[in-house]
Image (tube, grey):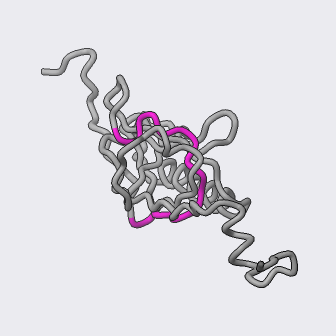
Amino acid sequence: MTYQNEPLYQEETLLEPSETQIRFEAILQDADYLLKPNSNNEFVSTYIPLTMNDHQLFMEVGEKSLMLVDMLKSSYSRKVATKQYETRKGLIVASQLFPPKLNIDVEYPDYLPNRKVSVSGHFRDLDNGSVLFNIDYLDFYEEDRRTQFQIEEEENPDSPFDIDF
């Protein structure tokens, strides 16, 4: 016995993490829901690719993931491959059901945006065909906390303007 709203065919995940794995450099843009879930119980963050090569690499693997979903779905599947890993402005969106692993301990999450990171993740598909990006590991670069004066002192230790009395 089947009910009208119950699907006759159970959709399966088609993408393998090993096939869609990627690593790229970026700037963390929005980290409001990086470590705590939003109202939909998802961990969401956005990124700006650091270079054009990083952006191109990410988009190529994303397009490959969309094509794989279209190619691997069965003939009676209702899946429609749709891109859910990019904003209208071209930012990368990571959306997942678990928090990513970080290389730092976060005491103040408000200081996370605008930091350079190395992102390691993979693409996955949902039962409706949406393709999402999941972060496996987020590696924050160490910040340079020196002042401009300290940097100049280290670069020019014997400046002609130094006067010893």
Q: Residue at x 35, y 45 (%)?
A: 107
Residue furthest to the right in view is 160
Q: Position of residue 33 (x, y in %)?
A: 41, 35
Q: Position of residue 22 (x, y in %)?
A: 50, 64
Between 1 and 156, the one lying in front of the other is 156
Q: Residue at x 27, y 17 (%)?
A: 5
Q: In the rendered view, would you say 12 is above or below 49?
A: above
Between 115 and 128, the one lying in front of the other is 115
Q: Position of residue 128 (x, y in %)?
A: 41, 34
4 left or right, relative to 154: left
Q: In the rendered view, would you say 19 is above or below 78?
A: below
The image shows a total of numbered marks equal to 0
71 left or right, relative to 100: right
Magenta stretch: includes residue 73: no
Q: Residue at x 31, y 30 (%)?
A: 41
54 left or right, relative to 112: right
The quadrant of the image that shows the C terminus is bottom right
Q: Quadrant of residue 161?
A: bottom right
Q: Residue at x 87, y 81 (%)?
A: 160
Q: Quadrant of residue 59?
A: bottom right
Residue furthest to the bottom in view is 158
Residue furthest to the left in view is 1
Between 31 and 62, the one lying in front of the other is 31
Residue furthest to the top in view is 4
Q: Position of residue 145 (x, y in %)?
A: 57, 60
The quadrant of the image that shows the N terminus is top left
Q: Main secondary structure of the magenta part?
A: strand
Q: Which residues are magenta?
A: 18-35
